[in-house]
Image (tube, helix red, strand yellow):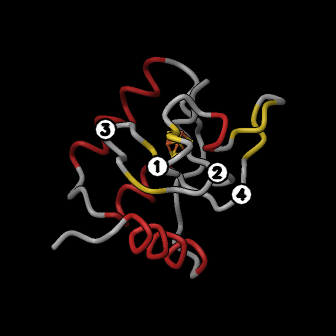
Amino acid sequence: MSQSDDAIRKEAEALLENGLKTTVFPRADDDAQISSIIAELNKSDGSLEQRLVIGGFTLEPIEYQEIEQACETCMYYLVHRRYCELPELDVPVEAEWSCRLWRI
Ligand code: SF4
């Protein structure tokens, strides 16, 4: 049986709280950078840990170029499910989390 969103979200939170080192920078601020991160995700084993690391996840918003980047304001965030629908990430998140593929 697949894990529930809540269970996966908790697992992700625990990994990040326990100091998983994620690639927070560089942020994906142009098409080349986005493609490169997506390619890296596609090459990975697709595990939750690898998605968090390559995606550069944090448990709090990252301020970048004077914009606060949080899942809550990202085009990939599904408010009611608290979920990131970017296919390469495809992961339950919290509104205040962030990743370097943030996009408006
Ligand atoms: S792509 Fe957007 S919604 Fe998905 S984890 Fe990153 S910031 Fe959050």
* Residue type, mark 1 in image: Tyr
Instruction: Point out the frontmost of discs 3 and 1.
Output: 1
| Quadrant assignment for the N terminus | bottom left
Question: Tag 3: residue type?
Answer: Pro
In the displayed structure, would residue 42 be above or below residue 46?
Answer: above
> Who comes first in sequence, dot 2 or dot 4?
4
Alpha carbon of mark 1 to alpha carbon of mark 2: how far?
A: 9 Å
Element on which disc 3 rests: loop
For residue 68, which quarter of the picture?
top right
Disc on the earlier residue, 1 or 2:
1
**Which amino acid lies under the numbered mark 2 shown in the image of this protein?**
Ala
For the point 36% across and 26% down, which residue is it? 35
Q: Name the residue under label 4.
A: 60
Q: Comparing marks 4 and 1, which lies closer to the viewer?
A: 1
Q: Label 3, on which residue?
A: 87
| Relative image position of residue 100 (x, y in whole percent) | 56, 41
Question: Helix or strand or loop: what does disc 4 sit on?
Answer: loop
- Circle on res. 95: 2
Q: Earlier in the sequence, mark 3 or mark 4?
A: 4
Label 2 CA crowd tier, 10 Å (few <14, some 14–19, many 20+): many
Q: Which residue is drawn at 78% across and 41% down?
A: 63
Name which of mark 4 and mark 1 comes first in the sequence.
4
For this rendering, which residue is in front, 64 or 102?
102
Q: What element carries label 1?
A: strand
